[in-house]
Every structure is written in structure tokens, then in C-alpha cells.
Image: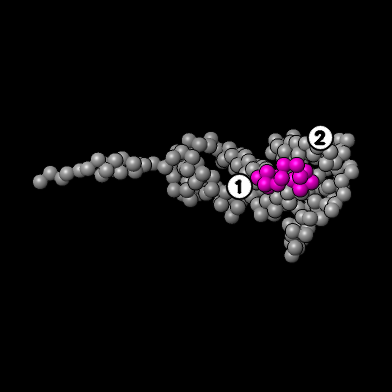
Amino acid sequence: MTRQTTPDTDSSATRIPRTKPAEVRLEELMAAAESLFLAKGVDATTVSEIVERAQVAKGTFYHYFPSKTDLLQALRDRYTERFLHRLQAAVDACPEAAWETRLRAWIHANIQAYVQTYRTHDMVYTHHHHARGNPSRNALLEQLLDLIERGNEAGAWRSASPRIAAMLIYSGVHGATDDLIAAQPADGAAFAQTVADACLRILDGTSPP
């Protein structure tokens, strides 16, 4: 007896993917590498261990990354992209004309994101304190500078040197958060508030509430 098939049966069979989409496979490779790098260190982790954790062939790894160094760069780019997006989302959640609130949101989100991800940060940016011309650092500075310049134009503060102010605030927040991570205080929110107050004093004409 011949088995009868229906259009629905045939179409459902054809909808089952034989392989994972490239972007899913790529993310799995990067997630596996990040987990191993954090647990063992970059140098101690082998490509064989990464592909075993991601359950792919070695050829798949080299299809995406010529070397482990290229994979580390991809993790660095992904970290920065996610960090920038998180800060921008915090700023965008504030009222458009509330410039001090928006700047405080940027500072608070920066501190919170760094505290939560510092192990990954330190893994992808081994020499971050000494990297002049670091593209990721510059991207964060430009994001902050845009916020400061727009607040300047709106009269929220009167900074004569917005770029210098941005560099001081960026460096101050980063350094203060390193201290926060080392000290591990019970009240991180109060710490962030104090840092935001100090940063706002850098902008001439602005006082904490």
C-alpha cells in the first residue's frame, strides 16, 4: 500500500534546517571561546578545546577565524559593541532635554556594565590602560563627547573644552570603577551617585542636586 502524503506533511519536512545558520554557529564558537578563556586563560586554551566545547569541526573554526588571535579580536569588538549599546540605551531612556539626567544615566550605566563584565573586559583588553589610540576607548569617548556637546548647546552646562571634559570624565569613571571592583562596597549605587556628582562638577556651571 502506498503511503499518502499531504502538502502539510511535505512542507513541514522541508522546513527542518539541516545545519545551523552561520550567525548562530559563529555565536556558539565565540561563546565557547569566551567561557574557556575566562576559565583557563587565552594562552592556555587551544583551538581543539574551543571546537570541542562548541561541538563543531576544526574546519568550521578556521572558516570564521584564521587564528585564535582573530577570535580574541572578534570578542573584543563584540564586547565594545554591547557596552556602547547598553550605555546608549540608558541615555535614550531619559527625557530628550534632561541633559544632566542623561549624563548621569551614561555614568551609572558605565559603572554598572563595567562591574558586571570586568572579567571579560580584562580578558579582551589585557593592556587597556596603556593602549593609546585604542578604537574601543575612542568610541566610548565619542559617545560621551556627543552627549556633552549637545548639553553644552542646550545650555545645560558651560564647558569651554568639551573634549577635555569628556576625557576627564571617561578616565575618572573608569578609574573609579576599578577601585569599586577592588573594594567591593556594599552600596554600589551610592558609589555611582558620588562619581556622577564629581563628574558633573567638571562641567563648568553644573552643580549636583
**Magenta stretch in the rendered image:** 89-102
Q: How crowded is mark 2: few (under 14 residues within 10 Å), some or many (20 or more)?
A: few
Residue 87 falls inside the magenta stretch? no
| Element at label 2 | helix
Which badge, 1 or 2, comes first in the chain's sequence?
A: 1
Q: Which residue is drawn at 81% across and 55% down?
A: 194
Q: Tell whether 73 sits left or right of 128.
A: left
> Which amino acid type corresponds to the residue marked 2 in the rendered image?
Glu
Q: Position of residue 63 (x, y in %)?
A: 48, 35
Residue located farthest toward the left when viewing the structure as drawn: 1
Q: Where is residue 116 in the image (x, y as percent from the top left)?
A: 66, 54
* Residue identifier under label 2: 153
* Residue identifier under label 1: 43
Viewer-side residue, 178 vs 96: 96
Q: Which residue is drawn at 65% across and 45% down?
A: 89
Q: Which residue is drawn at 81% across and 53% down?
A: 195
> Which amino acid type corresponds to the residue marked 1 in the rendered image?
Asp
Residue 90 falls inside the magenta stretch? yes
